[in-house]
Amino acid sequence: MEFKQSLAQRIIIAFALMSALVAGAFAIGIIATVHLVEEKLISAGLGGDLQRLLLMDSVEDWNHRPEPDQLFYFSGGRGDFELPKDLRHLDPGFHEVFREALSYHAMVEVVDGRRYVLLQDQSDFEERERVLFAVVLVGFVLSLALAAFLGWVLARKVMAPVVRLARQVRHRDQLLGLAPPLAPDYAADEVGELAVAFDATLGRLRQALSREQLFTSDVSHELRTPLMVLASSCELLRENPAIDQRGRNQVERIARACEEMRELVQTFLMLARAKHDDAASSPQGNLTQVAEDLLGIWREPIEKKGLALIYLPGNPLDTRYNTTFLHAVMGNLLRNALHYTEHGFIRLTLEPSGFTVEDSGVGIPEEKREAMFEPFVRGSEKRGEGLGLGLSLVQRICESQGWSVSLSTMEPNGCRFHVELSPVKT
């Protein structure tokens, strides 16, 4: 499993590791140096004590004792001075000897074929080493803690301009045409270069959004004229007595398609407008009014397909919403349910601040569920109609209005779309 750290965490870890390496190297150097120097001093002092003992008296008439923490042995010695067997193999020079639970420093010297050994208890030496190890360890831990704290402080200072830049880039106002550039607020360093790159990227995004809005607005505006011609032609054909019932049904179908196209064009035109006051000046209506209007449109094609249309009016609040957008969202979800349901029901449920559209259709595979709100994505390539833009339009409208739409599955099959609405901001 790969663990991902933030840049600030990496700085702290790098600072702590560097301090650990430096402090560890110093600690090892201090311990090794002290140990070596102390052994040299002990070796020199123990060698001097041994020479002093040898010069004091002759071996035959030996009556001098070493220091209280020392033991003296020699070959042929009498009593306590007799050389033990475990020391007879030692070569001349300085040694460390372990006898039972104690350890000693030993100095061995051979004079005229006779071996002399002077032992000194190294308990004090070991105690000093333990104190030294404890001091070095505490210093090492404190240096790591201090390094981590300093790394955290430095990481905050180093990352402050990066975090500030990230917040500015994430702010939705940066995509507005009048948004000021980011680079002048930063020094001419790596963060400044990043701000320059963001300015260039955001500039291209603003241009792309502007072109998209202009294109959508122009196309939507230009489509109004042919749609008006089609609608007026349908009105004239309805009044023509020479057309039979079959022809009238076709005219009604064309008229319904023209009305749906007109609403779709109006929706795209409103989405292309950048100012909030334009959207706020659009027709307003509550949830019940829009639902009843859409039921009048979709009841006939749904029941004609043999499906049951279930309407649960609930108790929605009398909140006013953008009628065009709400009509488009609810209408697209009903249309989507109709296209992908062959048997069963379609249910529209109104809630205090939203609504739910459920169906008993083919459902949406789990691997496609997250991509269903993307343009040109359809639930099944062999079922339904259209290009797969309906749910994408629903998502876009909900984002522009601060609404939310979610998709879940029904048991044993089918889909549930839930839309949570929020009042229009004025």
Image (spheres, rainbow, N blue to C red):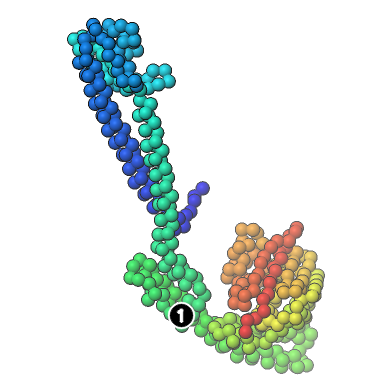
Looking at numbered disc 1 in the image, what kind of residue is underneath it?
A: Ala
- Asked where in the image residue 361 lies, by quadrant, the reply is bottom right
- Towards the viewer: 124 or 277: 124
Q: Which residue is denoted by mark 1 in the rendering?
A: 179
Image location of residue 8, percent across then percent down: 44, 58
Residue at 37% x, 28% y: name it: 124
- Asked where in the image residue 136 lies, by quadrant, the reply is top left
- Towards the viewer: 355 or 208: 355
Q: Is residue 360 left or right of residue 422?
A: right
Q: Is residue 401 left or right of residue 201?
A: right
Image location of residue 67, percent across then percent down: 31, 20
Marks counted in the figure total 1
Secondary structure of residue under mark 1: loop
- Asked where in the image residue 70 lies, by quadrant, the reply is top left
Q: Counting other residues with Cα less than 10 Å from the Cα at mark 1, is it few (<14), some (14-19), or many (20 or more)?
A: few
- Towards the viewer: 396 or 88: 88
Residue 76 seen: yes
Residue at the far left: name it. 112
Q: Is residue 278 above or below residue 399?
A: below
Residue at the far front: name it. 63
Residue at 46% x, 57% y: name it: 6
Residue at 45% x, 69% y: name it: 164
Image location of residue 167, percent across then percent down: 48, 70
* Quadrant for the C terminus in the image: bottom right
Residue 219 seen: no
Residue at 60% x, 90% y: name it: 225
Q: Is residue 267 left or right of residue 104?
A: right
